[in-house]
Image: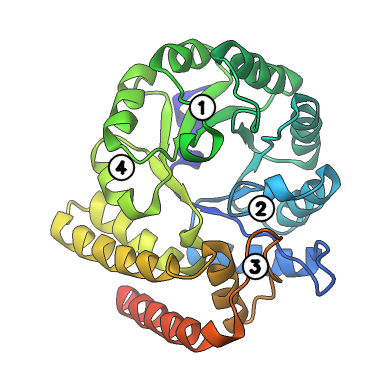
């Protein structure tokens, strides 16, 4: 892929939340409304069907429905990356082919989960996805949930293919991020995963970030990015510290995803409750959610001011 083509994947990409109706089924209209809102904030793209999107808790058909809704609404405006990772290589390939047909700009995948897999198994899983479409492929490295540790040697081997354009790294070590960037080279994308270290990731080599908490405060991550690009490191650090305080509060609820969805509901975006076993916010915690939402909105107003 030409270097210029990689620009669309840089910057702030929101890990999109899925939208459900009261019966827990995919709500395409609500998904389109949320995608439209995100497009208005100035972010670069949306990552659909990943951890924040509850892709692993959905059927193949449901994942297709969410992606179709997002692409129908903002596919011509934002970069859409479809996460197609699944416990089954067969399902991942089906999702990848659908993503290409639907108009996604790239596909991404975690290693197949549950079974303890060898590097050879993970490579074969990813290769089947890569070979199934003409789309660019972005590795998703999140060892704390998959149990698979991506080695530099496998990364280099995968990156040697033209269609493998980058890696989303959600490991907690920025050292590993820097090592992956060095191994992949300047024309290989490294996208920061841990939201609480966005600035650290950028300063050590990340080309941008993909995150779930971006979904309730994209303006604050855009502010960090703006300050970083302008060389205003002290101000960027200030906003990262603010974001981190808010993330700590979001993590104080039984489910981060439930907390983010509850906040979106307060703002008029009906995404429904997260899929079990992910927990919604309890009625007794709604006062805390409302106060946290007010704090986030206050910081957003300051960032815009």
Residue drawn at x 60%, y 70% as measured from the top left = 261
Q: Is residue 250 above or below residue 293?
A: above
Q: For the residues marked 2 and 3, what is the alpha-carbon distance in whole angstroms?
A: 16 Å
First reached walking from the N terminus: tag 4 or tag 1:
1
Mark 1 or 3: in front is 1
The residue wearing badge 2 is: 54
Pinpoint residue 128: horizontal percent, then vertical percent: 71, 18
Residue drawn at x 16%, y 54% as measured from the top left = 233
Return the residue nearer the eye: 215 or 194: 194
The numbered disc on residue 148 is: 1
Pinpoint residue 134: horizontal percent, then vertical percent: 70, 23
Q: For the residues marked 4 and 1, what is the alpha-carbon distance in whole angstroms?
A: 21 Å
Q: Is residue 116 above or below residue 22?
A: above
First reached walking from the N terminus: tag 3 or tag 4:
3
The residue wearing badge 3 is: 34
Residue drawn at x 80%, y 71% as measured from the top left = 21
Return the residue nearer the eye: 290 or 283: 283
Question: Neighbour class for label 2 at 10 Å: few (<14), some, many (≥20)?
Answer: some
Q: For the residues marked 2 and 4, what is the alpha-carbon distance in whole angstroms?
A: 25 Å
The residue wearing badge 4 is: 201
**Is disc 2 placed on a helix, strand or loop?**
loop
Quadrant in the rendering for residue 36: bottom right
Mark 2 or 1: in front is 1
The numbered disc on residue 9 is: none
First reached walking from the N terminus: tag 1 or tag 3:
3
First reached walking from the N terminus: tag 2 or tag 3:
3
**Is disc 4 placed on a helix, strand or loop?**
helix
**Is disc 1 placed on a helix, strand or loop?**
loop
Mark 2 or 3: in front is 2
């Amino acid at each position: 892929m030409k270097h210029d083509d990689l620009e669309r994947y840089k910057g702030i990409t929101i890990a999109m939340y899925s939208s459900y109706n009261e019966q827990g089924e995919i709500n395409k209209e609500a998904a389109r409304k949320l995608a439209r809102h995100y497009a208005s904030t100035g972010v670069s793209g949306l990552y659909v069907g990943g951890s924040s999107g509850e892709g692993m808790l959905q059927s193949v058909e449901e994942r297709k429905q969410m992606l179709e809704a997002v692409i129908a609404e903002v596919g011509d405006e934002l970069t859409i990356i479809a996460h197609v990772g699944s416990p089954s290589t067969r399902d991942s390939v089906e999702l990848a082919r659908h993503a290409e047909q639907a108009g996604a700009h790239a596909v991404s995948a975690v290693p197949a989960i549950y079974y303890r897999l060898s590097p050879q198994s993970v490579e074969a899983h990813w290769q089947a996805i890569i070979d199934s479409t003409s789309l660019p492929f972005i590795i998703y490295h999140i060892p704390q949930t998959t149990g698979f540790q991506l080695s530099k040697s496998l990364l280099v081997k995968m990156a040697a293919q033209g269609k493998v354009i980058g890696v989303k790294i959600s490991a907690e070590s920025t050292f590993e991020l820097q090592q992956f960037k060095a191994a992949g080279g300047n024309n290989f994308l490294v996208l920061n995963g841990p939201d609480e270290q966005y600035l650290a990731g950028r300063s050590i080599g990340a080309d941008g970030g993909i995150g779930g908490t971006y979904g309730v405060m994209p303006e604050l991550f855009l502010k960090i990015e703006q300050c970083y690009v302008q060389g205003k490191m002290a101000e960027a650090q200030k906003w990262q510290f603010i974001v981190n305080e808010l993330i700590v509060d979001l993590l104080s609820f039984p489910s981060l995803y439930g907390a983010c969805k509850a906040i979106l509901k307060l703002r008029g975006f009906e995404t429904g409750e997260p899929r079990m076993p992910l927990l919604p916010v309890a009625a007794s915690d709604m006062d805390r959610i409302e106060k946290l939402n007010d704090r986030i909105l206050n910081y957003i107003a300051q960032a815009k001011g």
